[in-house]
Amino acid sequence: YRAKAEGLGSAVFDPSIDMAGEDLLQRVAELRAGIAAGELTLHFQPKIALASGAVEGVEALVRWERPGGAMVLPQDLLPLAERAGLMGDLTDAVLEVAAAQAARWRAQGIDLPIAVNIPASAISDDRLPRRMSRLLAEHGLPGSALQVEITEQALLTDPDGAQEVLTALHDLGVRAAIDDYGTGYSSLVRLRELDVDEVKIDRSFVVPLLLDERSASIVRSTIDLVHALGLRAVAEGIEEARVADALTDLGCDAAQGYHWTRPLPAPELEAWFVEHRGLVDAQAGEVLAAW
Ligand code: C2E
Ligand code: MG
Ligand code: MG
Ligand code: MG
């Protein structure tokens, strides 16, 4: 059993996943069955436009809801899916759930683009744009209803393949973001040759923004460079109001983080969104009244 288990996904063997062979085989079988049974769900985290405070979209983050109620998070789920060769199935399932949710929200008058995280293995696969085109048509959605996020690392793996896929997605009207920017030491000028719209600055630079001058200058110069290239800057991992304020002062376009809310299941996100929209409208009203 052990030899067989170690053969699974051995190309991406990750020694940090401490699982015995039989246990791994069982978990792989459970994941395969779980995906087929529709146990992958999405939680949604709002993306806030910093200048207005308005919600400009949401990011979809995958969770595996096991039948007993246990929830498996991406840090455990993604390496398992990689090792099991199930990353393609996972991505298909996530895209399907996201498109269905986008259609439901639009029918309710909630017009929030949903950004989906795309793994390295899919970003240079020309089946991705075809799959997204079909999904959009099936759910009656414009391309702007879905967005993709690709990590800087994934883009570095095969920039030429990624370029073709991103151009095809761009032609569908699907916007793209470079995720976790700053962790891959790449040239943003080089990445600009890709059809991307947005750069998400990694949490590891945002968290120490007010604590150390080096992080502050990295964030400041990244935002300026992103703007010089005609792209939007988005910051990840904002947990405090004063970090949100500092990013607003630096001209950062949008941000996400626990400061506003953790990722939420769809019904809770809807309730949060309605309440937040009320607050933003009330504030805008006060500003008008003060005028
Ligand atoms: P990411 O795309 O950079 O997503 C941001 C992660 O940071 C999410 O973790 C989110 O819950 C978390 N986060 C958001 N705001 C804060 C904050 O203020 N503080 C802290 N400490 N964390 C915050 P999550 O959901 O565990 O996802 C982790 C990573 O897994 C994601 O990083 C993404 O790379 C990957 N991932 C998530 N869903 C999918 C998916 O459907 N497909 C693929 N291929 N990857 C996914
Ligand atoms: Mg992301
Ligand atoms: Mg990110
Ligand atoms: Mg990140």
Image (spheres, rainbow, N blue to C red):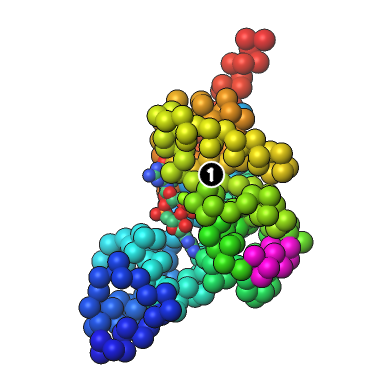
Q: Quadrant of the N terminus?
A: bottom left
Left or right of residue 17, residue 176 in this image: right
**166 is higher (above) or lower (below) than 83:** above
In the rendered structure, which amino acid carries the disc numbered 1?
Ile
**75 is higher (above) or lower (below) than 208:** below
Residue name at image x 39 percent, y 80 percent: 10
Q: Quadrant of the C terminus?
A: top right
Residue name at image x 54 percent, y 71 percent: 121
The question of residue 167 being in magenta is answered with yes
**285 is higher (above) or lower (below) than 28:** above
Residue name at image x 36 percent, y 60 percent: 75
Of 288 and 187, the residue lying toward us? 187
Q: Mark 1: which secondary structure?
A: strand
- Quick one: label 1, few (<14), some, or many (20+) residues within 10 Å? many
In magenta, the rendered stretch is 159-169
On the image, numbered disc 1 is attached to which residue? 201
Dominant secondary-structure state across the stretch colored magenta: helix
